[in-house]
Amino acid sequence: MPQTTFPIAAVMIHVSDVDMGLEWYQQAFPTATKKTIVEADFDYLEYQGIMIELVQADEKVSSGAAGSVVYWWVDGFQEKLDTLLSLGATLYRGPITIEQGMKMCQVKDLWGNCIGIRGK
């Protein structure tokens, strides 16, 4: 488990297939590193000091668009959007132009969860 000074420790994403989720998010964030918490037998991705935790959707928390959306800073907005769409994500909101000429939008992953991106 990474030790960081970031205010966000982890982003938990509920999916119907955890192995497929790990694989998809590894492709969506190719610089993320797959790690394992051995004593918990739990795999996750570490991306810029934040844990991306793919967990099984269930009757308490399903996958899909509802509530909070995490926005990720990206260096090349259009390039990241194109990558996500090529992996099967679908455009959900935007893109729109925001402050300082930046763009933002939301896409849905294969399980209907929203991913926000912001950048130039």
Image (tube, rainbow, N blue to C red):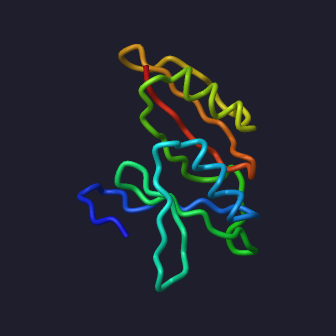
Q: Quadrant of the N terminus?
A: bottom left
Hey, which residue is sitting farthest bottom in the picture? Answer: 39
Q: Residue at x 28, y 55 (%)?
A: 6
Q: Which residue is located at x 60 percent, y 27 percent?
A: 81
Residue at the extreme left: 5
* Residue 111 vertical placement versus 103 (above, below): below
Identify the residue at horizontal 71%, vertical 53% (top origin): 64
Q: Position of residue 8 (x, y in %)?
A: 36, 57
In the rendered view, tell whether residue 87 sits above or below residue 79.
below
Specify the quadrant of the image occupied by residue 13. Answer: bottom right
Q: Quadrant of the C terminus?
A: top left
Q: Is residue 96 above or below residue 56?
A: above
Residue 76 or residue 8, whichever sits in front: 76
Q: Nearer the viewer, residue 33 or 54?
A: 33
User: At which x and y percent is residue 59?
Assistant: 75, 74
Lateral position of residue 96 relative to residue 15, left or right: left
